[in-house]
Image (tube, helix red, strand yellow):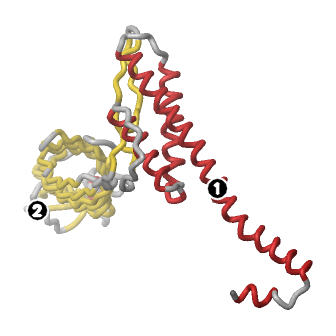
Amino acid sequence: MFFLLILHPMKPVSAHIICFAIFLLSAFPVCAQERNADNLGDKLEQYESLCRTCLNLKQRIASGENVSRSEAKMHIDDFVAMNKELQSVEADMTVVQRLRFSAISSWFSTGVEPQETDTALPQLSCNLAGKSLVATIGSHAAIAEVPSMQAGLPAHRYVEPRRNLILMSSFAVPDFSCGLIAGYQYGRWGGYAGFRSNYVSAKTSYSCLSDGSLPDWSSMWSTGRSRKSNLSITAGCLIGLGARFSMYVGTGYGWRTLAWEDVDGEWAEISDWSHRGAAFETGAIFIWKRLAVSAGISTVSFRTCSLNVGVGVSL
């Protein structure tokens, strides 16, 4: 009514021009919507055709016909791509188009061709989830990744596996020691802490070289008795390399002390064979069910080298 009151005082020609312009502007969205609906209709036709082709291909394979792997993969990839494209524009579909999209997806998933109906059904949403179709082609088997449709089901969130690792560990080259490694891994990444020692104390009163020389140019006289003390405290990260393998890399502090007893009953540290400082280690862990086995190497200040092996449980 307000629009008619505005046009009333205008000249007839001007009023007709304005009316025609407003008509064109109001008709443009309708035409665009119709074109979009027609475009979606064409895509649904193509989607249905691809579905029919894939199901016919499946029947040919089931009947023992030789079908090339490349042909099967090409049609399946086209169907998957079209499904993803239609899912992205599902909000722009009409109720009938959504119903048709859902029916075609269900047809592909179940193999049962839907019956046409004029009754408007509730909107269904279909998502792709991975499924394997094993097809025997000639004398060899071809496995094509075929998506299956799950109507009305939310996408499941993949939860990374968790692992608790407790390993009794020991290394024997050059010296024996044992200890405990405890680690926690969530998915691919995790952390651990370890302690190893031979639990031998080697308190010394002075130091000398392995040739017996002392800083004052004298020499020590050894009784032939010796002691070795070693310790390593490390922490680091666990890196998953697959379902059964993990890699560990760590650093910390450690020492290796060699002591000789002299004729006076005192102990001397052999300085050129004793080392202390930063400790580094790396290795791999193999996990099978509840069993965990590790192997690696370690060093103290890059002056020693030890082989580490361990066995324990994975919880």
Given this view, does label 2 or label 1 mark the residue nearer the observer? 1
Is residue 299 visible in the rendered image? The answer is: no
Q: Nearer the viewer, residue 293 or 225?
A: 293
Q: Which mark is residue 201?
A: 2
Is residue 266 visible in the rendered image? The answer is: yes
Lateral position of residue 112 relative to residue 32, left or right: left
The disc, 2 or 1, on the residue closer to the chain's N-terminal end is 1
- Alpha-carbon distance for marks 2 and 1? 89 Å
User: Within 10 angstroms of label 1, few (less than 14), some, or many (20 or more) residues?
Assistant: few
Lateral position of residue 45 relative to residue 295, left or right: right
- Identified at 92% across, 78% down, the residue is 13
- Identified at 50% across, 47% down, the residue is 84
- Identified at 33% across, 48% down, the residue is 151
Residue to which mark 1 is pinned: 34
Horizontal and vertical percent for residue 66?
A: 44, 11
Residue 260 found in image quarter: bottom left
Horizontal and vertical percent for residue 27?
A: 72, 65
Horizontal and vertical percent for residue 156?
A: 30, 53
Q: Nearer the viewer, residue 103 or 246?
A: 103
In this rendering, is residue 42 above or below 204? above
**Amino acid type, label 1:** Glu
Identity of the residue furthest to the left in this view: 265
In this rendering, is residue 45 above or below 220? above
User: Within 10 angstroms of label 2, few (less than 14), some, or many (20 or more) residues?
Assistant: few
